[in-house]
Every structure is written in C-alpha cells, then in structure tokens.
Amino acid sequence: MDVRPEQADSPLAMSAALLRDYRFGLRVAEQGHVVSVGDGVAWIEGLPSAAMEEMLLMEDGSRAMVYHLTQRMVGAILLRQMPALTAGTAVHPSGLRLTIPVGDPLIGRVVDPLGAPLDAKPAPHCTSRRLLDGPAPPIVARDTVHRPLYTGNKIVDTMIPIGQGQRQLILGDTGTGKSTLALDTVIAQQGRNVFCVVVLIGQNRATVVETIEALQAHGALAHSVVVVAEATASPGLKFLAPYAGCAIAEHWMHMGRNTLVIYDDLTTHAQAYRELSLLLRHPPGREAYPGDVFHIHARLLERSTCLSAGAGGGSMTALPLAETELGEIAAFIPTNLISITDGQLYLDHGLFAGGFLPAIDIRKSVSRIGGKAQHPRIKEEAGRIKLDFLQFLELETFTRFGGRLEAETARKIHRGRVLRKLLLQDKRDPKSIEFQLTWLIAYNEGLLERMPLERIDEALERLQRVLAGGTLAVGSGRARWVEEIGAALRNLAGDP
Ligand SMILES: Nc1ncnc2c1ncn2[C@@H]1O[C@H](COP(=O)(O)OP(=O)(O)OP(=O)(O)O)[C@@H](O)[C@H]1O
Ligand SMILES: [Mg+2]
C-alpha cells in the first residue's frame, strides 16, 4: 500500500488510499498486539520487522513510535494514547517515520509536537510535511556564519555577538532570566524577516500562557510559531518537541529564509529522554542518563546552520536553554551542551540578586564564531569594551576594602561603573543596532564619564532622541555621530 506521509494521520484518507491502490493477490501483513502499556510507553509483541522510529497505528486510534527493539518485543513511545488502549490491542506497523506539517500556515499558531493545534483554531492547512528527525544539511551545503543576528540586547550585540546560523547556549540557574532573554530575542526580530519557532518543553500552563501573551502583546506572534509540550504532556511528546520545532524551521531554512529556534529548555528535554530510556530499559550511565543523551542533542543542534548561496542561503539560528544547579556549569548536561554549541551566555544568580539585569556574566560568556558576523562599525567601537569591563571588575574587587585610590584608578573605576550602568536593560525592550552604536560612541568618546551615575538613564534617553531625528545611519561618518551625540548630551555633564 502506498500511503503518503500526509495521509498517515487520517483514517479516512488511509482507507481511500487503500481502496485506490487495491489489487487482488496474496499479501502478507504483520499485526502485533500490545503486551503492556503505562507511563507513556508500550511493549508490543508480534512485529518482527518493525524498524527503529517507525510509526505504529493501534486499532483504538492510539499512535506510537518504535524506540527499542528486542528479539521478542518492541518498546514504543506513545504519541497519542486513547483511553481504550490496553494489553491485547492490535497494532499495525505503518512503514513510515514520523512527520509533521510545516509551512506558512503555521505562522502565528500554537501547536503540539505532532502539529495539532492548541490554540482553539482549526488545524493549520499545510501542504508539506517534514520528517521530525531528518538529516542535518551536508557539509558542502553549509556556509560559515557571516551575517549578524541582532538580539536587541546591549551586552550580547556588542560584546558576545551572535550570527545567523549560530548555536548559542543560554544557561543559568532557575529564575535568572534565561527565558526572558530568549523571548526578547524573538521580539527583537520584528521587521527583520527572521521566522521564529519557540519550543516550550515541560513548562506549566501558566508560564506557557504568559509566554504566548508576551509574544502577542509585542507583535512577535506574527512571525513566530510556538510548539508546546506542557509539563503534563507524555514524556514522548516532551522528547519530540525540539525535533518538531527544528523541522518547522528547517522547512523555511531550505526555502532560503532566516529562522531562529528557541529550545526552552534542553535540561527538561534530557530528563524526559532519561525517563523514556529507563522505561525502555536502556542501560543508564552518568546521573542515570542513557549513554546517547549527548548524541540526541548533537543531532538536534547540528541541523542548525547557515546554508551556502548555492543551497538557497537560508539559516537556522538556535538558542538552546539549559538549567544549572547552584551555578555548576560543569554538570553533565551543561558541559555536553557547551561542547556542542558555538558559545554560551551564562546568567548568574549573584548578578541577578544584585540587580544587574540582564544577569549575563560577561566573564563566563563567549561567542566563538559570532565576531565574524558582527557589523564592522559595531566591532570597531566594541572592540575594547569587553576587556575594559573585565579589568574594571577585577580592579573593583581589589579596591573593595577601602584605602586611598590614585586619581587614575578612581577614574578607571568610575568609567567601569558608568559602563555597568549603561549595560542595564529592562525586559521586552530590544534596542536597535543604531542605538547600540550611539551609546558605544558616546562611551568611547568619554562623553558619559563626566556625569554622575544617576544621570546615565537621562543620557540614554537623550541618545534615543538623537536617533528619533532619523538623520543618522550606521553608514554615516563617525565625526557626524560624535557631533550629534555631543550636542544631545550637552548640559548633562556635572562633576562625577
Ligand atoms: N532584564 C530584565 N529586567 C527585568 N526583569 C527581568 C529581566 N530578566 C528577567 N527578569 C525577571 O526575572 C524573572 C525570572 O526570569 P525567567 O523566567 O526568564 O527566568 P528563567 O531562568 O527562565 O527561569 P526558569 O529556570 O524558572 O525557567 C522573571 O520574573 C522576569 O520577569
Ligand atoms: Mg524559563
């Protein structure tokens, strides 16, 4: 029987396909039966030719995916479980791997990892489907990361820049602002022609609703899809959620578009996979995770890339999130993810508690490839800022215990404090790249050092107004920028 992927889900379409392709003759079909079912997995007997990741159709309408093969039985992850599913239910192999509907009708929608709508609207009418676990683009189709992806965040865009096609990990303890930073990046893509996929794994409903409302309130749902496997979803759906999000973005990437995927978060994903693996009796390894937990994340993140012009030039940037405990970035899952990604943004609990928001710890954060994609003007201005800031932090620690400071040291410390104040940023307030250039030039020219710290906010407001005039562009000469910024900040300077 020739069942096309798009028909696999609907019993009516399946019957139609059966009738259309019906030919008289002898045929052998396999039919197994459920031996036991529970905790999101089913054990099935009587399917000797079942293949890994093959979809199984149960006679009561349940769906499962083969994920463990033994000589007598197969272990399957339940994707849809009907109340009538019990031991003895007949099971038919579909001969197909799992696919998900993809394409433009998904924009603005909230779907589950199988593509079913969760927003009380009709199912999106997609004409294409894509394998959930498809292969990563081959090396020859890839290009180096060379275009910037602006996050709207002052620290990231200037000191730890991200490029389109990069995989940048966001990690930190719980409640340090990881989701906020990722979501702000999605909001910042407005008008930049970047299609976003937000994958929420194992979050409670209140957080999911809050996220969707935030996207909607800032007009970001118009260029995004949200894939949700809530905390109460089966471990199978939580496991598949990032692959579903990746497949949706991949479709657009292969059409030559730029995409951004947020995986919130991969620690929960690894835990769902650990649960499944233990239920399916895979041998446990470190922290009871199965040995291939590294592989499942690498396989996912390798699908993010920047395609070469010959392959359409599309890109998929990935921002996976991971949770640390007590700031321990050397734990199993965080170190695995750090080694797979192209850099990390580490959010620190101490900085958060001290009111430095976003709480990005610049010492522990790095972007290994984003520098190549940074705009030359920003790169030129931001070149020394990171080093300056790190030096200031060290100096501040050394001088914390009082004593008289030399004038030069006191000046350096004040300059560092000005920079720290400049880097503060509220949530849901993405900054344009022109604004980044404005404050960088103002800082580098020393225009902000002459004023007391309390006036920095006012100075930033004035800088924003310089841009509102619309006379400055990133391409304008530096002298013009300095002149206009200087004029805007006049009368603001006082004694530090
Ligand atoms: N830049 C910011 N300005 C103001 N508030 C912020 C900022 N960043 C984060 N917050 C606040 O900090 C709190 C925690 O943020 P968030 O939920 O993003 O953290 P998280 O690391 O994703 O937490 P979890 O691990 O629980 O998912 C939220 O109430 C959020 O509004
Ligand atoms: Mg979060």
Image: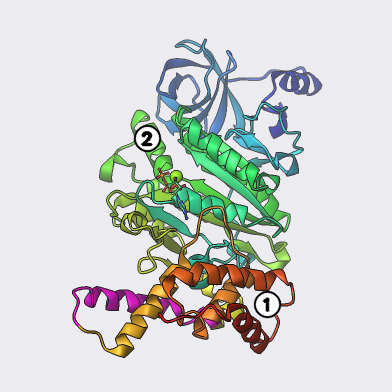
Quadrant in the rendering for residue 38: top left
Q: At 71% from the left edge and 77% from the top edge, which residue is drawn?
A: 472
Q: At 69% from the left edge and 18% from the top edge, which residue is drawn?
A: 26
- The residue that label 2 is drawn on is 277
Going from N to C along the chain, the mark reached first, 1 or 2, is 2
Q: At 30% from the left edge and 38% from the top edge, which residue is drawn?
A: 283
Residue 334 pos. (x, y %): 35, 53
Asked whether, in this view, residue 434 is left or right of residue 302, the answer is right
Q: At 46% from the left edge and 27% from the top edge, which residue is drawn?
A: 232
- Is the residue 270 above or below the residue 82 in the image? below
Please tell me whether the stretch drawn in magenta is mainly helix, strand or loop: helix
Residue 386 pos. (x, y %): 43, 76
Residue 101 pos. (x, y %): 68, 37
Residue 74 pos. (x, y %): 44, 26
Q: Are marks 1 and 2 in contact (CB under 8 Å)?
A: no
Of 11 and 274, nearer the camera is 274
- The residue that label 1 is drawn on is 474
Magenta residues, as a range?
381-403
Q: Quadrant of the N terminus?
A: top right
Q: Quadrant of the C terminus?
A: bottom left
Query: Quarter containing ligand 2?
Result: top left
